[in-house]
């Protein structure tokens, strides 16, 4: 495999902006401890190119991902930008199916954090036991574990179990989180991670206090009143980009 982390690339201004945003997201995930060695994936559709999306080069750490070494592939797995890096088949199979069939799923991540994997492996899934979890109750799909996701025929079941939601908990495996934008997906993932962390801590102490259905409805109704301008997750993502920049700006190359 090529060892050059940066490579010359020709693309539209829109694609380069998307590449930088996705590369920043990889670095943020790494800074937050959400990376898993060279595994897992975050993907983003290429603006103006039907059926094309960007994904991480298989073999690089998230801390090595930058705008120029992201791989552009189509939904059939063909490399479109001359990259010499391979793509993890598990990432392609799963993400490509969602990108193909869900036009609203522009940005998709799949992680293996300890807490989200623990909750996905818990019989009752995510409980309405804390502030963050209350935003997600009734808005998560669950998909039973079928082994590593490399078979195209599993895609239809993944889509069915996702339903109208933007989070799919793969049982015994971990979550897939989707958004119309990278910031929206990031913020959803951040809140889900916090919900799972707190649930794990609460269950370790004993029986949790669960929030009633009536309060859940009020909570979910009123959440929009505490959002900042710029779209879902935009201020949060921008803040973390600033923090990443203070650590290492090489993701921009």
Image (tube, helix red, strand yellow):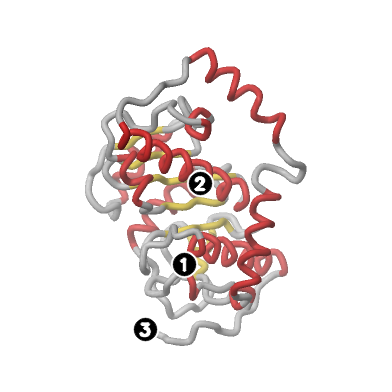
Residue in front for this viewpoint, 163 or 233: 233
Labels 1 & 3 near each other (Cβ < 8 A) = no
Residue placed under numbered mark 1 in the picture: 56
Residue placed under numbered mark 2 in the picture: 189
Residue 101 on image: x %, y %: 48, 43
The residue drawn where x is 68% and y is 64% is 242
Residue reaching furthest to the front: 205
**Mark toward the viewer: 2 or 3:** 2
Residue in front for this viewpoint, 41 or 99: 41
Element class at badge 2: helix
Q: Mark 2 or mark 3: name the one nearer the start of the chain.
A: 3
Residue reaching furthest to the left: 147
Q: CA distance from mark 1 to mark 3?
A: 14 Å
The residue drawn where x is 49% and y is 72% is 63
- Up-down: is 163 above or below 120? above
Labels 2 & 3 near each other (Cβ < 8 A) = no
The residue drawn where x is 50% and y is 78% is 82
Residue 189 on image: x %, y %: 51, 46
Q: Is residue 116 visible?
A: yes
Residue 66 quadrant: bottom right
Q: CA distance from mark 1 to mark 2?
A: 18 Å
Element class at badge 3: loop
The residue drawn where x is 42% and y is 72% is 61
Residue placed under numbered mark 3 in the picture: 1
């Amino acid at each position: 495999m090529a060892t050059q982390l940066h490579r010359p690339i020709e693309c539209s201004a829109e694609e380069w902006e998307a590449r930088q945003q996705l590369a920043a997201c990889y670095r943020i995930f790494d800074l937050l401890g959400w990376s898993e060695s060279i595994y897992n994936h975050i993907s983003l559709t290429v603006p103006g190119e039907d059926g094309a999306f960007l994904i991480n080069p298989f073999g690089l750490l998230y801390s090595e991902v930058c705008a120029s070494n992201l791989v552009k592939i189509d939904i059939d797995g063909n490399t479109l930008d001359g990259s010499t890096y391979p793509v993890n088949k598990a990432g392609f199979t799963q993400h490509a199916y969602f990108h193909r069939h869900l036009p609203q799923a522009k940005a998709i991540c799949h992680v293996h954090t300890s807490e989200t994997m623990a909750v996905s492996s818990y019989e009752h899934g995510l409980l309405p036991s804390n502030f963050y979890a209350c935003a997600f109750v009734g808005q998560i799909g669950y998909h039973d574990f079928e082994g590593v996701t490399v078979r195209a025929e599993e895609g239809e079941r993944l889509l069915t179990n996702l339903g109208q939601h933007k989070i799919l908990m793969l049982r015994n495996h971990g979550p897939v989180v989707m958004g119309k934008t990278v910031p929206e997906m990031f913020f959803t993932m951040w809140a889900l991670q916090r919900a799972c962390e707190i649930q794990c801590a609460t269950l370790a102490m004993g029986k949790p206090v669960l929030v009633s259905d009536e309060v859940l409805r009020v909570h979910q109704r009123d959440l929009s009143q505490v959002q900042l301008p710029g779209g879902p997750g935009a201020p949060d993502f921008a803040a973390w980009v600033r923090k990443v920049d203070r650590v290492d700006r090489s993701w921009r190359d």
